[in-house]
Amino acid sequence: MSYSLKEIFFTLQGEGRQAGRAAVFARFAGCNLWSGREQDRASAPCWFCDTDFIGTDGPGGGKFTTATDLAAAVRTCWDEGGGPGGVPLVVFTGGEPMLQLDDAAIDAVHAAGVSIAIETNGTIPVPRSIDWICVSPKPNSEVVQRSGDELKLVYPHQVTPDEVADWDFTHFYLQPLDGPERTAHTDACVAYCRAHPKWRLSLQTHKLIGIP
């Protein structure tokens, strides 16, 4: 199987439990909930998506013929981006990474000495061989991956915390819906987390400090 990635870049994780950690972000092209075209946005379950995942023309992006080629690109990005120390980490995201991420790629990346996190909409089962599973449910979609390390819910939105609070995750995060009403949405997240301490606030710190 070949792999199509929009971009591969070195940065800090901006959201959730691992915010602030150095990581390679590897963004797969394509999604099963939205075409990525603006004319289809209004009817998409994740109409609020702020990511360009069309094509393979981003920094470090391209088509990788083998799992070994993909793993080598990830490892090179880590080695060139950071200094010594720490555990190498790649965050596979998208689009929807589980459309392409398979056992061969997982094994090859692990063989390269890199831990794997995934950010997924949960509509496709995720192998437990992935080291960190973050699921972000979207409205009007069937979520089959109801267990993992981190559940990150955009709030306020059509999927409510009550609907997912009993799923089998270690950490539960509310992330303010971005846009013109972000301040009000942040206030709503803060109020909910205060009233329901099971939930924690996740901010998109990469946007706040201006990094990719």
Image: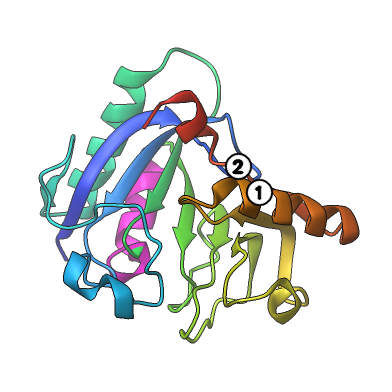
> Magenta segment range?
97-111
Q: Residue furthest top?
A: 83
Front residue of this view, candidates 103 and 165: 165
| Closer to the camera in the image, 27 or 37 | 37
Mark 2 Cα within 10 Å, few/some/many (few <14, many 20+)? some
157 over 115 or under it: above or below? below
Q: Are marks 2 and 1 in contact (CB under 8 Å)?
A: yes
x and y, in percent, of residue 197 in the image:
88, 56
Image: 67 above or below 146: above
Q: Secondary structure at mark 2?
A: loop
Viewer-proximal residue among 103 and 199 = 199
Q: According to the image, label 2 marks what residue?
A: 203
Where the C terminus falls, by quadrant? top left
Q: Which mark is residue 36?
A: none
- Residue 9 lies in quadrant: top left
Q: Nearer the viewer, mark 2 or mark 1?
A: 1
Q: Is residue 26 magenta?
A: no
The amino acid on which the numbered mark 1 sits, given as a three-letter code, is Thr
User: Which residue is disc 1 drawn over?
Assistant: 186
